[in-house]
Image (cartoon, rainbow, N blue to C red):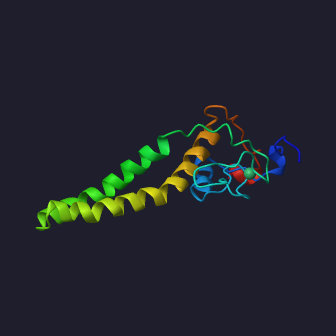
C-alpha cells in the first residue's frame, strides 16, 4: 500500500474548519470524510485507509477530556442545583449525578477527540500541514 497521501485534487477536502470539525465529530477522517478516524476507542488510525492522511502525528492530548468536563459540568450544574433546592439530599443527588456524569463523559470523549483532531488538522497545528481545496467558480458565489 502506498504511504503517500492522496493529492488534494483526488480528495473531497472540507470547505472550512466547521466541516472538518464535523467530520471528526462523526468519527470520520476530517480530510476526506470517507473512512473511520479511530481504530480503537481513543486511538486514531495510523493512516486513513482512503486518503492516506497520517493521523499518528495528532496531538489532541488531554484537550478532549477538558472539553468534556467543561460541557458535562455546565449541563449538570443546573440539575444538581434544582435537585438540592428541591429537597433531595446531597448524598442521593451525588448517587444519581455521578454515574450520569461518567456516562456522559465517556459517551462524548471519542467524538470530541475526533473534532479536536479535525480542528488541529484544518489549522495545521502541530505536525499537520495545512491544505485547502482548489477554488472553484461555485465557491466564489
Ligand atoms: Zn481520509
Q: Please say whether residue 106 is visible from this viewpoint.
A: yes
The residue depicted at 58 percent of the width and 55 percent of the height is 41
Seen in the image, is 33 located left or right of residue 103? right
Residue 45 x/y as whole percent: 70, 49
Choose top left, top right, bottom left or bottom right for residue 122: top right
Q: Please say whether residue 82 is visible from this viewpoint.
A: no
The residue depicted at 62 percent of the width and 49 percent of the height is 43
Toward the top, the furthest residue is 126
Toward the right, the furthest residue is 1
Residue 44 x/y as whole percent: 65, 48
Choose top left, top right, bottom left or bottom right for residue 60: top right
Q: Who is closer to the viewer here, 38 or 95?
A: 95
Q: Is residue 139 above or below residue 78?
A: above
Q: Is residue 64 above or below residue 78?
A: above
The residue depicted at 32 percent of the width and 58 percent of the height is 75
Seen in the image, is 22 located left or right of residue 87? right
Residue 96 x/y as whole percent: 27, 66
Q: Who is closer to the viewer here, 15 or 136?
A: 15
Q: How many dots with numbers?
A: 0
Seen in the image, is 70 located left or right of residue 108? left
Q: Is residue 136 above or below residue 100?
A: above
Q: Who is closer to the viewer here, 45 or 129?
A: 45
Amino acid at each position: 500500500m502506498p504511504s503517500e497521501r492522496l493529492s488534494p485534487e483526488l480528495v473531497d477536502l472540507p470547505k472550512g474548519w466547521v466541516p472538518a470539525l464535523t467530520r471528526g465529530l462523526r468519527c470520520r477522517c476530517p480530510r476526506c470524510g470517507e473512512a473511520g478516524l479511530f481504530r480503537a476507542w481513543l486511538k486514531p488510525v495510523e493512516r486513513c485507509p482512503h486518503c492516506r492522511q497520517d493521523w499518528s502525528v495528532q496531538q489532541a492530548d488531554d484537550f478532549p477530556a477538558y472539553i468534556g468536563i467543561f460541557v458535562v459540568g455546565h449541563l449538570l450544574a443546573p440539575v444538581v442545583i434544582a435537585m438540592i433546592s428541591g429537597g433531595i439530599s446531597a448524598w442521593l443527588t451525588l448517587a444519581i449525578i455521578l454515574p450520569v456524569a461518567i456516562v456522559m463523559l465517556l459517551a462524548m470523549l471519542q467524538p470530541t477527540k475526533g473534532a479536536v483532531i479535525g480542528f488541529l488538522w484544518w489549522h495545521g497545528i502541530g505536525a499537520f500541514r495545512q491544505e485547502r481545496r482548489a477554488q472553484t467558480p461555485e465557491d466564489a458565489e
